[in-house]
Amino acid sequence: MIFNVLTVFRELYMSPLKYGIVSKAIKTKKIKINLYSYGDFLKEKERIDDSQYGGDSGMVITYDKASRAIDKIKKNNPETTIVFLSPKGKLLNNKLAIELSKKRNITLVSGRYEGFDQRLIDNYADLELSIGDYILSGGDISALAVIDSVSRMIDGVVGKRESVIKETFQNSLLKNSVYTRPISFKKNRVPKVLSSGNHKKINEFNRSSSLNLTLNRREDLLEKANINIQERDELKKIKVKNNNSNIYLALVHYPIQNKKGEIIKTSLTNLDIQDIARSCKTYGIKKYYITHPVKEQRKLAESVINYWEDSEINRTENTKHDAIKLIEVTKSIKDAIRSIRLIHNKKPKIVATDARIMHNMVNYPELKEIIELEDSPFLILFGTGWGLTKEVLQNADYILKPVGGYDNYNHLSVRSAVAIILDRLFGCKF
């Protein structure tokens, strides 16, 4: 494998390439690294950078001068894959590192300042690559990271192939915890199974450690991981045990807006009762409030609930009817809040939902993190009709971004919206 690196500061590579696995790979000729400086292709008094068109601050690597360097590299390496290091690029991961390791020749174009003239990327880039969602002073650290991660995947670079196979992010899992001598130090002991000599139990312990670490620290990785049914069930049990059980949901029938923006009461829909209750049960919601100021409507809700609780169907061990037990019928949002306050001795944080885009809305990852970090109860409000009133939205602690497709049509039933939103916030992704 040949790496060609185009950089402003060639000196930055001298020390890192002298040590570790990459250094050994160079000495054993598993990889070769050619360092090119933009300065080698500049005429006297020329600069590689220039100010931006449009008036923004910051200098940009110029198209005409940088192209000289890239053209020369391509002439020397006709089959090279040209990779621009940029925070706008595709995110480097283990799978991509493996794919790049199959190339015979890679050119890493490292930037500085405010980046490259876009025409360089348009005309030369086979791949634009980022090592993370953060900003560095230049692409050199990124280039070194790419060289290191890709080189490790080349046969013979790492002494034991088994070490590469078992590393973090292989099979989309974090590596299990590891230990060494002494076996006991300051009352902290290495898990006994690791010194037992029973390789089957050791493998099982390490696999369990890997799965648990991934669940606790990078659950998102489990979506692509190869896990069996038993492991999935065990992980789900752990998640249920650790989940915040202080989430409540209310279906609001007043105050609601109609199409004209007038404040109205909406009628109860029978399907909303059981269907939303089943979504709440599926995603671990503690209680589902149906709020309505009209006594007859509350009685209707209670009669539907009583039917499902007393029906012949319910006595056949069909567990979907357990969801009905989550429902509580109240007059208003305030009554639901009062009920939650009695349980937790504190007012819940209010999360309002709406089908319209507004300023200062919270997105799903943000809200999920807030819920995980706080010990407060949360009440998620869903409106009927044309949505919750402005007053309700303004008084909420958070307004959640709407669900929907890319088309302007967005008239999901409240039942559908509840299921989608709860899945985004609390759904199992593995």
Image (cartoon, rainbow, N blue to C red):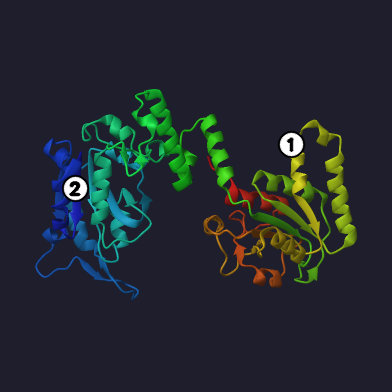
Front residue of 190 and 314: 190
User: What's the mark number on residue 319?
Assistant: 1
Which quarter of the figure is the N terminus placed in? top left
Q: Position of residue 32 (x, y in %)?
A: 15, 41
User: What's the mark number on residue 24?
Assistant: none
**Structural crowding at the residue carrying mark 2, measured as other residues with C-alpha within 10 Å and reported as few (<14), some (14–19) or many (≥20):** many
* Dot in front, 1 or 2: 1
Q: Amino acid at mark 1?
A: Thr
**Please, is residue 167 above or below residue 295 in the view?**
above
Q: Is residue 218 visible?
A: no
User: What's the mark number on residue 4?
Assistant: 2
Extreme residue in the front direction: 187
Q: What residue do we see at 42% from left, 37% from top?
A: 209
**Please, is residue 86 above or below residue 319 in the view?**
below
Q: Position of residue 106 (x, y in %)?
A: 24, 44
Q: Position of residue 385 (x, y in %)?
A: 76, 61
Front residue of 46 and 355: 355
Q: What residue do we see at 14% from left, 68% from top?
A: 46
Q: What residue do we see at 76% from left, 34% from top?
A: 318
Q: Is residue 379 left or right of residue 333?
A: left
Front residue of 55 and 179: 179
Q: Secondary structure at mark 2?
A: strand
Q: Position of residue 89 (x, y in %)?
A: 36, 53
Extreme residue in the left direction: 44
- Alpha-carbon span between mark 1 and mark 2: 62 Å
Q: Amino acid at mark 2?
A: Asn
